[in-house]
Image: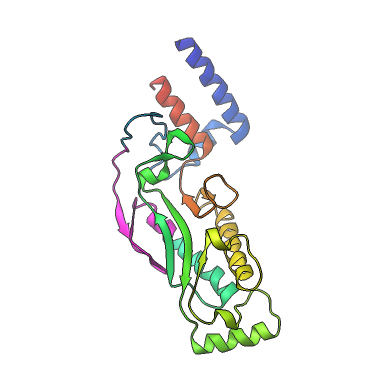
Amino acid sequence: MRAVRLAVAALVLTVLTLAHGGLRRALRAGDAPLDEIPRLVPARGRLVCPRVPLVTYAGSRLAYAAPVRVHPSFRPHLAAFEELVAGAAREVYGREPRRLLHAGGYNCRRVAGWPNVLSEHGLGNALDVVGFEFGPAAKKEGRLARGKAARGKAGLVGAGLAGAFSVRVLRDWGGGRGARGLHARFLHLVLARVRAAPELFRVALGPGDPHHADHFHLDRSPTLARNLWLSLRELLGG
């Protein structure tokens, strides 16, 4: 049995070396404090999540609909995400959202569809974003937006969105006419910019990914190579 395990180990290490430019570089790719925790868990039975420090976070640039519990190392990434969202919103709507809507941070559970893998939520290393709320435009913003919209400037809020409104991933991702088209543009822009900044989140999932039709899942999980190596090391008992 030991020989079989070693053979499997050799095969996995070869794949890692070819796919990720060397195991050593792949291991260096994860420099966050949670990277050393294996994500492999029993597929059945009661799940016991690792004990990690958690802090309560309610947003910096944007207020959260409810405070979330996250690992301290994850909080700066959320603050940077809020800055990204604010910038994208100014481009599309001429103003920033006032509230971020989410489905939670820390939650001790397995990955949906992968019962032997610990969810990053179980480490406070993830956030599920379901949408954003915008307050009414200031009078100056409203006049400016209406003037630009009348001149046909694409991507700017029109008169119909001068009041308060919400943007939801499930409802608005597919776009449509009028405001729905602007909402879709905003959501696509946010996710595209997150994915273009791997230092922000290592994983960014959304509509089109299994189980993510109604939210953006953002986390700082280790690279695939590191995940496989940690699970393999646990399996071999070394």
Q: Relative to residue 104, is residue 176 drawn left or right?
A: right
Quadrant placement of the N terminus: top left
In terms of image quadrants, where is residue 182? Answer: bottom right
Q: Give me the residue at 42% from left, 59% from top.
A: 102
**Horizontal and vertical percent for residue 193?**
58, 59
Q: Nearer the viewer, residue 161 or 200?
A: 161
Give percent across and percent down for residue 151: 70, 85
The structure residue drawn at horizontal position 38% and vertical position 52%, both measured from the top left corner, is: 105
User: Looking at the image, is 162 positioned above or below residue 119?
Assistant: below
- Residue 125 vs 182, above or below: the answer is above
Give above or below for 237 relative to 200.
above
Answer whether residue 61 is magenta in the image.
yes
Residue lying farthest to the right in this orientation: 152
Q: Is 68 situated left or right of 154 in this image?
A: left
Residue 237 at x, y = what percent? 38, 21
Prevailing SS of the magenta stretch: loop
Per the rendered image, the range of residues in magenta is 49-78
Comparing 26 with 167, the one in front is 167
Whole-percent x, y for residue 119 in the image:
42, 41
* Up/down of 160 relative to 50, above or below: below
Give the residue at x 38% y 56%: 75
The image shows a total of numbered marks equal to: 0
* Magenta highlight on residue 43: no
